[in-house]
Each structure stands twice: as structure tokens, then as C-alpha cells.
Amino acid sequence: MDFSQLPQPSERNIAIHVTAAAERSLRGGHPWLYDNSIREQSKDGQAGDIGVIFDKKRHFLAVGLYDPDSPIRVKILQHKTSASIGHDFFRTRLQAAAQIRAHLPDDGTTGYRFVHGENDTLPSLVIDRYGAVLVVKLYSAAWFAHLRELLSALDDIHPAKTIVLRLSRAVQDGETFGLSDGMVIRGKLSESKVAFTENKLRFVADVIRGHKTGFFFDQRENRQRAMTLSATKNVLDVFSYNGGFSLYAAAGGAKSVLSVDISQPALRDARQLFELNANHTNIANCQHETMAADAFEALRQLASQRRKFGLVVVDPPSFANKASQIEDALRAYRKLTALALPLVEKGGTLVMASCSSRIAPDDFFATVHHTAQRHHYRLHEIERTSHAIDHPLRESFPEGRYLKCLFATVD
Ligand code: SAH
């Protein structure tokens, strides 16, 4: 791969002095420094320059990647003690990330998140493993200047024959130094769909064009929980994408599964997933149907047909990434809850998920409960859950706690 156009990180760091509020936030370990928290900086910087942040008394606070195009001006790589950012630094970080996930392949899982950005103290960076393929996704142009060193560190920890590069929308819109979204930057990929396993179930994902990097690994443990609740049931999987929850439900012994999504290609993938796993007796015996429709419409239609399901999973896309979208998102969750409840048979289970980063877990859970009460349903909580283990949480980074999921029995 030709990386010759990639920029070199500047030899001179940028010294940055910040407001008292930002000082407190950085002392608390928060990984972002906003542009409006900067009081003074030693020079203008390029994306990928190293920003070194000092407190009022000129003591070191944190070091990170400078990003002039983002309101999150510095993405913090390390707090409290200084660090030289390069191969060895990345190696140590990747080693720590690898350790957290080390047990997953032994459980029959070869598709998982290898690096989860801020939560693995590598901000704006995601690395997902799909079997033999690694997908590196950059959410900030600041990474271009460090890509070579990052990849060489990755070779030390998890050598891969094939590496795919994905770029976030914002990164695609700027200078990309001869690289592009979906580019195979190492090895070859005969087709964009890559095979991997999750808990011994077979999956494929389109790592070149799929949402995020191709699959939603964050729901793995929730899918496993849904599996244990599926035996002999008719299951409805709303916003099914390529059928993650649907397949687990079938593996758990569901009598039938109906996958609903607005995307025809996603549903075609879901049908193929069932074929791919036809060697699994439960999956072969499960009656799988798909329905391409707007979820709100589909739920209304199923209710008008008086259909009932023993397990209903509702896992919509994010409704709120900005503060201004919070009210609309809560309204959408109320509507989905109200539409899903009449479809759950008495004593059946409702699984409601939210991946909207701006909706706090307590607000989401309260919204589901209030809606149930208003419509005279009793919810008995089984569990409130969050991300799978490969999406670690950090106390100091509440913004990273985006996934929340409620499992409840409905009376
Ligand atoms: N449950 C999935 C992930 C869901 S992602 C999993 O476990 O992997 C969200 C999905 O919602 C996408 O597949 C998208 O196509 C679908 N979607 C978005 N808006 C929709 C709508 N109005 N009606 C139905 N599906 C929709």
C-alpha cells in the first residue's frame, strides 16, 4: 500500500493552556478538550500534531492528538503523566485492548471490537476484527499522521493478512492523503462480505459498505440473553438489520422468527444468515420470515392482524446524537414501546434497546416504564443491560455509555 502521501507528525508539539473547567474535566480523566476551553496555545496546529496540555501552574495535565477541524480540538491519549506518542505507545495501548478480549475466540467468537475508541484510550479510533480481517476505522483526520506507526504496532499485537480502512463521513469530507473509505490497505479481499463467528454461530458482514464497520458487535451479549428467552416462542425482531437477534432467537429454539427492517439488502443478508447456519438443528427447524417495511407501520399492521409474539425485540438506530434531538428521540421510544406492547403475548418478553448517545440510561428506562403504565401494561424487569465486554466502559467518559437495553416480562 502506498502511504507516501501521509503527513508526518510535526516535530514540535503544541503547548496548550485551558480554562479552569476544562482543567477539572481533564483531571477527572475525560478524553476530550473542546476548542472553546483553550485559553492559549503556542502555535497553530495541523491535524495529528501532538497537543500537550498544562494547568494554571504550568504543570502537565494531558497529551493528545490535535484536530483543528473538530470542536473536540484535542483527543486525549494520556492523562497525568507525559508520554511519547509513537509505535511503543500504541503497542502498549493495543496490548491492553487485546487482553480484555483475549477469551472471546475461545468462546467461539472471532468477530468483535478490538479497539473501542476513547474507551480503550485510543480516541476516535475503532478497530474491529472479522475473522482473519481487521477493519480500522478513523473518526478523526488526526490519525492519518500516525497511521503507519499504529499499523506497525498492530502487527506486533495482532498480525493480520488483510486490513480494510474505513473513514467516518467527516473524515471522508476532508483531505484523505490518497486513502479512501473501504480501501483494502493490506492484502486482498476477494469479496466485501467477510465470514466470522459469534458464540459459534456463523455470520458474514460487508466490511466495505456495511453500517459502522459492517456489524453491530455491541449487542452480542444482549443477543445471547435473547437466545435464552426464545425456546418454543414466536419471535419478532424489529430493526433486525442482517438478523443478529433473529439468528440467536432461532438458535435458542424459537418456533418462528419474523425479522422487520426497512432495508431490503439487510433482510436478504438475514435470510442468507439462516441458510449459512442450516447445519444448526434449531435454526433449520425455525420458520424464518422477513418483512421489508417501516418499523412503525409494520408494528401497526401486525397489531391490526392481532398477531402475538412470545418475544419482541426492538433495537432501533440512534435517534439522538445531538442535544436538540433528545425530545424527538424520547417521543420515538414512547411510540415504539406503545406499538410493541400489544404484540407481546401475556407473560411474554419485551426487549427494548437504545443506542442514542444523548439519551441517558435512566431516562430511557423511565420512558419505557411510563409508557407501559400509561397503556395499562405491567412490566416486570428481568434485567437492564449495556454493551458487550469488547465495548468497555470508562467511569470518566459517560458519553461512551450509549447502549442500554431493557429485558422485561409483560402482563
Ligand atoms: N438489531 C440489529 C441492529 C439494528 S441497526 C443488530 O442486532 O445487529 C438499525 C436498523 O434499523 C438498520 O438495519 C436500518 O436499516 C433499520 N431502520 C432504520 N430506520 C428504520 C425504519 N424506520 N423502519 C425499519 N427499519 C429501520
Image (cartoon, grey):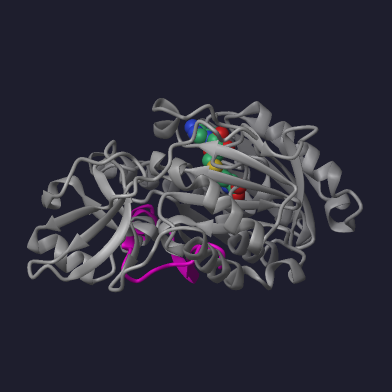
- Residue lying at 55% horizontally and 31% vertically, measured from the top left: 181
Q: Is residue 51 above or below residue 157?
A: above
Which percent across, then down, holds residue 352? 49, 55
Residue shown at 36% from the left, 47% from the top = 334
Q: Is residue 411 magenta?
A: no
Q: What residue is shown at x 77% (from left), y 65% (from top)? A: 108
Q: Is residue 345 visible?
A: no
Q: Which residues are magenta?
A: 369-398
Residue 400: x and y, percent? 38, 58
Image position of 34 (left or right of 160): left
Q: Is residue 398 left or right of residue 157?
A: left
- In reply to whether residue 373 is colored magenta, the answer given is yes
Residue positioned most to the front: 11
Let me know if residue 58 appears in the view. yes
Q: Position of residue 27 (x, y in %)?
A: 22, 71
Quadrant into which the N terminus falls: top right
